[in-house]
Image (cartoon, rainbow, N blue to C red):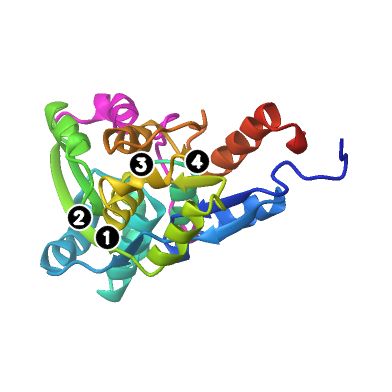
Amino acid sequence: MNFDAKPLSGKCIAVTRPREQSIEFVSLLNAMGARTIEVPTIQFIPPTDRKALDDACNGAPTFDWIVFTSAKGVDAFMERYIALKNDVQSLRHVRLCAVGPATAAKLGDYQLVVNAMPKEYRGEAIVELLEQYMPGARVLLPRADLASKILPEALRRAGAEVHDVIAYRTIPDQSKRHEVSTMLIGKQIDVMTFTSASTVRNFVAMMGDTSAPHLLENTLVATIGPVTADTASSLGLTVTIVPKTHTVSGLVQAIAAYFKVSDPTCR
């Protein structure tokens, strides 16, 4: 037994997050001893037509709630809000809901206080948390173009007037396709991680609907939460690791815990 070995020493873990969002994740994995390969499967770009977003930014102070479901959503909205010369101080009168600590921390970067954060980072938990406030409320929901319609529809059923606005678009990034394919065929990647449904969908699209499951036959699939896991399963991938805490830190801990049990060299 090597008492000096770190929990993920000798393991190669692929990170499919966009480069601008992968710094913390990669750092946590490296601190655990893992070797990481960055395989961004998506890129973030502005909306094709910004009119709806601009209108939402200019009218933001008139909403009762703004619900942010990701840190990227915060940045995309706030950068445009500020670019349009709106005063961030005027948003302090609007109640803010953040999904997850990273999203809440990003709002804090803009000196904004979060009024509500669900314990579980999924649509149903958001609705359960906000349901009592929804009848007659005007809710702004700035999100990605491919975001699920489940949340806005549920908030509307709870009585809210929901403005679901595209704050940014996600497009495929295939820059690492050949490299990661070669590594998977050579069984050089121990874990392929996915932190959103879009990273899974674009990975499968990049590799091919039928090829992706075969390429991952000898590689563990780890997802940040159940929504991402469900997407992966629906596309034919076998998901082995899903953390109880749906954050990148929780995901790193879950991967380490898996190898502690299954691989004696990681104990």
Coordinates of residue 7 in the picture (x, y in percent): 73, 41
Sequence-wise, the earlier of marks 1 and 4 is 1
Q: Find disc 4 in the rendering and name its residue.
A: 218
Residue tagged by mark 3?
Answer: 213
Query: Do residues under tags 4 and 3 come within 8 Å of each other at their CB atoms?
Result: no
In this view of the protein, can residue 97 be seen by the observer? no
Q: Residue at label 1?
A: 170
Q: Which residue is mark 2?
A: 145
**Distance between the Cα atoms at labels 1 and 4?**
29 Å
Q: Residue at 24% across / 53% down in the picture?
A: 142
User: Percent from the top left, x then y, of residue 244?
Assistant: 51, 28
Q: Amino acid at mark 4?
A: Asn
Q: Residue at coordinates 42% horizontally, 30% vertically from top-left?
A: 120
Is residue 253 among what the camera can see?
yes
Q: Quadrant of the N terminus?
A: top right
Quick one: SS at disc 2?
A: loop
Pick the front one: 201 or 150: 201
For the residues labelled 1 and 2, say whether their Cβ atoms are less than 8 Å apart. Answer: yes
Mark 1 falls on what kind of element?
strand
Tag 2: amino acid: Asp
Q: Which residues are magenta?
A: 108-135
Q: Quadrant where the C terminus lies? A: top right
Who comes first in sequence, dot 1 or dot 2? 2
Badge 1 crowding class, 10 Å Cα cut-off, few under 14, some 14 to 19, many 20 or more, is: many
Q: CA distance from mark 1 to mark 2?
A: 7 Å
Q: Is residue 129 magenta?
A: yes
| Badge nearest the viewer, 2 or 3 | 3
Please identify the quarter of the rendering in which residue 110 is found: bottom left
- Mark number displayed over residue 3: none
